[in-house]
Image (cartoon, coloured by chain):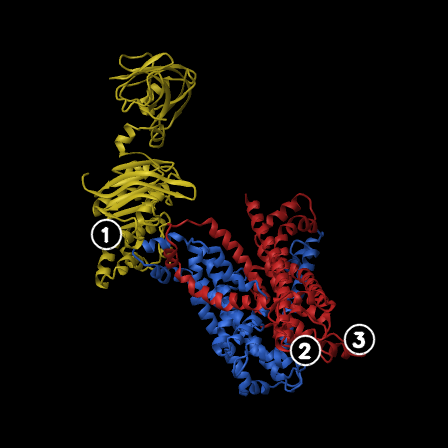
Chain colours: A red, B blue, C yellow
């Protein structure tokens, strides 16, 4: 599963909380500080040696060709229409998947928070979360079975006499989008639901009382208040789509690729590691940029709730 | 609001409530989406009971023979065991390392604290596939064979942030004076952590460990680069198979993974409550 | 008390740029009950936490039983603390909460049981040994918190507003229990509170703090009778503050308020220079209202602006010709009934009642 960035919400709130509760401690020498914080070091060591260091070794490789420092890799990538088309395709698919996720996920979040009977809430949460506990491979595989040339959807349509020849659904952009949306909906639902849980439902009643129609009350009161969740969910889903490998690889076929597939290909099949590192760099920059937007959205939602209470 | 005659309204109340057609539409739509979330997995599991090698739904003839094949094929069984072992070990190690780290980060002030936070959570920000290739490369450069230990360490890196995040969040909720009381009563720092903090944030620790287990269990993007001598994890094996073709025994393997996932959902619900887990 | 158990000398502590404790010195005698009294943010809790070892002073010395403890971590100090939130261990039974400290000292388990049971009996909770804190009432939790620290026989017990979470009735009862408990165990208590009544009810001595400074440290009686500053006069009990001009220093010291001579028999370190303005503090119960001035009593004309019958006291709200509001509580009920709002009266007080206070 690819829940990487969701984490960051925790990081942001956590920093803010711990700043608020922070108490400066007694001043001491650097050595004394080191002794005091030693329980941090084993975890930090793992992170340094198995995360920071590998990345620090790999990414600069894209700036060296035949031992000479150069940006040739990047001029190569950015000067080649092929790479642009892959980057463009990655962004396009991710954007479409994100929008679809929002359209499908928001009503589910609303249903989950506002409409479902208290006793059934747990079951709905289970249905939303359970798919997250299975690998993307398995979820893509289910769609392979459904969308294939002789897959279940084609069989059903043929049997019903609605079509004469099997539809070509697999190995298209459409299939990739379906696969991505399917994987990402839970993230969108959980992001929106988390914010919606904190929106006072009497606000909607007050709007109704003041003469708003049900839809008007939702659209003018509840929806604007859930925007932080919508934004956070959208950035999260977008970033996860952008860096996903399994779904495009299995449902998109080999011909039209996304960035993650290029990286895999360069490292595992073509063994052009500098180029692979270069594409990784591009993907990383784009992803971090999206995450930056996600953090901004979250920070605003935290500030927003505070402002609302004050 | 749609005006509904009182009689109709009471009859439909369970569905329509007092709000009328708009709410009914949302309900129907949401239930449809939820159905779509479940349907592919149900179809997959149903197809695993098929008697024929060729995947079909509804299954042609019911049979458990492909399950028998799965559980007697060492390649599948080994990958299943490897996946479970890696997930369990990574979760334990990540918790053992992550809990003290989270404790220090939440409770103490020191220069570089923010940097340490960022570093410890940053594996969540970097696309998994990039982490995967970076690890592949560093191990290759070092000439290390991708042994069990190497794969395990890679998983520890990618799942430890979940432990730190979850444990950190529950530490925020602990009244700091309880720890001070323990120190005041003569407990050393290790004793405070082991005798007071750990029991108080027990559910946070369990949640962190469970998340770590799940994240390791579903991982493909890192495992795919680090095939262990003698096998791959289950998701990677499945990935390699279905790039060629999907046979019923592969569907059985996927179904077994789904059973594990369901068991995990029930464990999470039992221990943490699924809705509070969703908010973590 | 000659025998000193805690000695604090010139302690300063600041957080970032905020000075929390500013040059405080005080000593606590063996067996004394001392309250640190002040409004929230006055530095009393920080001072207490420095005694416990949770904060280190930026400057100054803290000695407990003669030994400097500034560099001693909390778990090695011979003091224990009762927290405002009680800080009971939620995952341990009452018995295990009490045993926690003894077990850290590796006390043999037979002795742990004996001590714990003894202290459970002392606070009347012997039947609750196997309960968890969440299964106890607020008052019971309070007793567990007390017993948990007392069982360790600390040299000094530190209490951080331990009664603040209780309702009024229970608080009164716990005050009494606390006082009795202290007498029984004979340990010095340092008690932080913002509640003046609580401080008066419990303490041998009170240290009044504001803005990080120690304003006055004395017995309750001394502080009530001879407040040194306007703040102390107002914070411990109620006070009328009148602005006056210092006319003559001596016995008695003479002041002037709206042309009248006012005598103050004990001016203390009479603050202010001759013919400069000073502040006169009067306790409401010392202010009486009479038809005409008597000999040897200070008097000022005033108008009655309001009256309030409170059962155990009769409050008259007065306004002097200078427009200063004065509260009088020195009236009996019959005299109270004869006075109507709007009446012109002479308010009066004895020269021994007034105090000159620093602003």
Subunit bearing disc 3:
A
Above or below, A189 against C13 in this view is below
Disc 1 element = loop
Quarter of the image for the C terminus of chain C: give it: top left
Q: Secondary structure at mark 3?
A: loop
Q: CA distance from mark 3 to mark 1?
A: 88 Å
Q: In this rendering, which labeled residue sits more in front, label 3 or label 1?
A: 1
Question: Does residue B9 appear to the left or right of C47 in the view shown?
Answer: right
Instruction: Give percent across and percent down for residue A142.
Output: 65, 75
Q: Are marks 3 and 1 on the same chain?
A: no
Q: Are marks 2 and 3 in contact (CB under 8 Å)?
A: no
Return the chain for callout 1: C
Q: Which residue is mark 1?
A: C153
Where residue B17 sits in the image (x, y, percent)?
64, 56
The quadrant the N terminus of chain C occupies is top left
Instruction: Identify the mark at residue A145; answer none if there is no mark.
Output: 2
Mark 2, chain letter?
Answer: A
Quickly name the residue at label 3. A162
Where on the picture, by quarter, is residue B56? bottom right
Q: Residue at x 74, y 77 (%)?
A: A154
Q: CA distance from mark 2 to mark 3?
A: 20 Å
Which quadrant of the view contains residue A167? bottom right
State how far apart marks 2 and 1 are (Cα).
73 Å
């Amino acid at each position: 599963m690819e829940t990487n960035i969701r984490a960051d919400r925790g990081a942001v709130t956590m920093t803010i909380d711990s700043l608020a509760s922070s108490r400066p401690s007694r001043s001491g020498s650097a050595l004394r500080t080191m002794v005091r914080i030693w329980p941090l070091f084993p975890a930090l060591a793992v992170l340094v040696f198995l995360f920071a260091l590998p990345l620090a070794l790999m990414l600069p490789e894209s700036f060296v060709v035949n031992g000479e420092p150069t940006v040739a890799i990047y001029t190569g990538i950015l000067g080649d229409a092929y790479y642009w088309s892959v980057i463009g395709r990655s962004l396009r698919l991710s954007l479409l998947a994100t929008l679809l996720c929002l359209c499908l996920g928001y009503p589910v979040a609303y249903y989950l928070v506002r409409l479902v009977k208290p006793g059934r809430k747990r079951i709905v949460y289970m249905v939303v979360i359970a798919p997250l506990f299975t690998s993307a491979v398995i979820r893509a595989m289910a769609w392979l079975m459904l969308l294939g040339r002789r897959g279940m959807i084609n069989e059903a349509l043929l049997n019903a006499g609605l079509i004469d020849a099997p539809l070509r659904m697999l190995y298209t952009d459409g299939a990739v989008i379906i696969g991505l949306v399917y994987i990402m909906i839970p993230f969108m639902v959980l992001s929106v639901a988390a914010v919606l849980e904190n929106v006072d439902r009497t606000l909607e009643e007050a709007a109704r009382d003041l003469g708003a129609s049900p839809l008007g009350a939702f659209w003018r009161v509840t929806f604007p208040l859930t925007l932080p969740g919508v934004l956070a969910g959208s950035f999260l889903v977008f970033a996860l789509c952008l860096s996903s490998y399994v779904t495009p690889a299995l449902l998109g076929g080999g011909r039209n690729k996304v960035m993650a597939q290029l990286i895999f290909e360069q490292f595992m099949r073509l063994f052009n590691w500098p180029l692979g590192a270069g594409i990784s760099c591009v993907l990383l920059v784009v992803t971090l940029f999206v995450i930056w937007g996600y953090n901004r959205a979250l920070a605003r939602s935290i500030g927003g709730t505070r402002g609302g209470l004050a | 609001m749609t005006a509904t005659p009182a009689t109709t309204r009471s009859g439909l109340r369970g569905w329509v409530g007092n709000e009328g057609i708009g709410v009914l539409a949302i309900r129907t739509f949401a239930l449809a989406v939820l159905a779509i979330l479940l349907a592919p997995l149900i179809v997959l599991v149903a197809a695993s009971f098929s008697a024929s090698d060729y995947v079909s739904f509804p299954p042609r003839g019911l049979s458990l023979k492909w399950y028998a094949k799965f559980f007697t094929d060492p390649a599948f069984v080994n990958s299943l065991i490897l996946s479970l072992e890696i997930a369990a070990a990574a979760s334990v190690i990540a918790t053992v390392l992550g809990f003290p780290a989270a404790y220090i980060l939440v409770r103490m002030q020191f220069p570089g604290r923010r940097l340490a936070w960022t570093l410890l959570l940053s594996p969540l920000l970097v696309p998994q596939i990039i982490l995967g290739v970076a690890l592949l490369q560093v191990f290759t450069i070092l000439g290390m064979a991708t042994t069990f230990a190497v794969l395990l360490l890679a998983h520890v890196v990618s799942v430890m942030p979940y432990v730190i995040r979850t444990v950190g969040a529950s530490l925020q909720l602990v009244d700091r004076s309880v720890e001070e009381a323990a120190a005041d009563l003569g407990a050393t720092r290790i004793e405070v952590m082991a005798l007071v903090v750990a029991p108080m944030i027990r559910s946070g620790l369990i949640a962190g460990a469970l998340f770590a287990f799940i994240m390791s269990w579903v991982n493909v993007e890192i495992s795919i680069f680090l095939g262990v001598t003698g096998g791959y994890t289950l998701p990677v094996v499945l990935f390699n198979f279905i790039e060629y073709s999907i046979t019923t025994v592969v569907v059985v393997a996927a179904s077994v993974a789904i059973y594990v996932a369901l068991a995990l959902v029930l464990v999470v619900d039992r221990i943490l409550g699924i809705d509070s887990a969703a908010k973590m | 008390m000659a025998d000193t158990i805690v000695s604090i000398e010139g302690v300063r502590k600041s957080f970032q740029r905020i000075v929390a404790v500013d040059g405080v010195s005080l000593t606590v005698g063996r067996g004394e009950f001392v309250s640190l009294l002040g409004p929230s943010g006055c530095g009393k809790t920080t001072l207490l936490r420095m005694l416990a070892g949770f904060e280190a002073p930026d400057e100054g010395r803290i000695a407990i039983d003669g030994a400097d403890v500034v560099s001693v971590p909390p778990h090695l100090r011979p003091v224990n603390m009762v927290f405002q939130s009680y800080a009971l261990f939620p995952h341990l039974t009452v018995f295990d909460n009490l045993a926690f400290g003894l077990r850290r000292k590796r006390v043999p388990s037979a002795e742990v049981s004996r001590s714990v049971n003894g202290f459970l009996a002392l606070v009347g909770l012997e039947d609750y040994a196997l309960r968890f804190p969440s299964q106890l009432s607020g008052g019971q939790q309070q007793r567990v918190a007390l017993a948990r620290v007392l069982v360790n026989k600390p040299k000094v017990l530190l209490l951080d507003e331990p009664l603040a979470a209780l309702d009024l009735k229970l608080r009164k009862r716990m005050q009494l229990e606390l006082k009795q408990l202290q007498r029984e165990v004979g340990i010095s208590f340092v008690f932080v509170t913002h509640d003046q009544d609580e401080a008066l009810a419990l303490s041998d001595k009170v240290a009044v703090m504001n803005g990080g400074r120690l304003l006055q440290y004395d017995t309750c009686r001394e502080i009530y009778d001879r407040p040194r500053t306007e703040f102390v006069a107002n914070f411990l009990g109620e006070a009328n503050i009148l602005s006056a001009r210092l006319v003559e220093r001596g016995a008695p010291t003479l002041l002037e308020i709206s042309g009248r001579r006012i005598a103050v028999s004990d001016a203390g370190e009479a603050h202010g220079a001759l013919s400069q303005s000073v502040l006169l503090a009067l306790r409401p119960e010392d202010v009486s209202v009479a038809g005409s001035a008597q000999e040897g009593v200070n008097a000022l004309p005033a108008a009655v602006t309001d009256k309030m019958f409170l059962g155990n006291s009769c409050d008259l709200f007065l306004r002097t010709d200078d427009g200063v509001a004065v509260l009088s509580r020195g009236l009996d009920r019959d005299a109270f009934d004869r006075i109507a709002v709007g009446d012109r009266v002479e308010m009066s007080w004895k020269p021994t009642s007034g105090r000159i206070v620093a602003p």
